[in-house]
Image: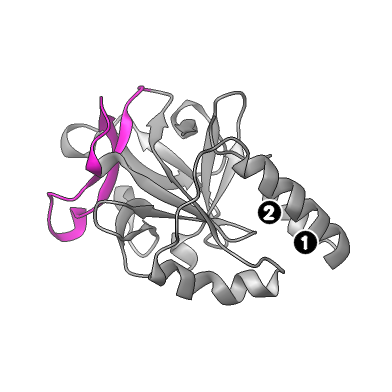
Amino acid sequence: MPLGMPRNFGQHFQESTGDSMKKLAVAACLVLAGTGTMVTPSPALAQSVTSEAAERGTSAVSCKNRTIQSLANGKYVSAELGWSGDNYGMLRARSSKVGPWEKFRFCYNGYNYTIQSLANGKFVSAEFGWSGASRGMLRARAPRAATWERFYINSCGTGCTSIQNLAIPSRRHVSAELGNKGNRSGMLRARNEGVGPWERFRIR
């Protein structure tokens, strides 16, 4: 089953503490039900989210190993770890099968998710410091999780999830850039305000 949440999931946590915690418990069950075996979070992740989880009343970080598949072209998302420089770790929907570069760890802290490449141990970042066609590019390159490394996972229908970066003020949905050519074909970017065909994924 895909790992997904209702639309605007984060808004549920803006309410009173009592109601929020009830919804948190329900949401956590919905997210985690039937999705496999728990895995232990990495030390870097545990350090980066422990205080936030404690503030929100959650006692642990829940992690699952997953693949990401674009529903637009049917390809699995890869972290391009064979590349160098600014392209290192670029996420692209380009693989027809699952290998080491197509495996990710999704960790939920009671409010949002981090995405971590299992191949290099780095967190996925949305590069909002860049401009032009590279702005918001997703790369597996961060040693710890901050704002650019946090995401909402939203339901967009049966078997469909969208990925939304939390960076304010944009909070853009992740797109697979299928109009690009060459090495940037299928590049993932947090750049769209809405959810269209290129923003639909299957996470399982």
Give the number of the disc on residue 10: 2
Which of the 4 image quarters holds residue 10? Answer: bottom right
Residue drawn at 83 percent across, 67 percent down: 17
SS label for mark 2 = helix
Q: Given the image, on which type of amino acid does mark 1 rest?
A: Gln
Give the number of the disc on residue 190: none
Q: Residues within 10 Å of mark 1 (few under 14, many from 20)?
A: few
Q: Which residues are drawn in magenta?
A: 73-100
Q: Is residue 8 visible?
A: no
Residue 76 vs residue 156: left or right? left
Residue 135 vs residue 112: left or right? left
Which of the 4 image quarters holds residue 198? Answer: top left
Residue drawn at 50 percent across, 59 percent down: 150
Q: Nearer the viewer, residue 146 or 19?
A: 19
The answer to whether 184 is drawn above or below residue 94 in the figure is below
Q: Is residue 44 visible?
A: yes
Give the number of the disc on residue 14: 1
Q: Given the image, on which type of amino acid does mark 2 rest?
A: Gly
The answer to whether 39 is drawn above or below residue 100 in the figure is below
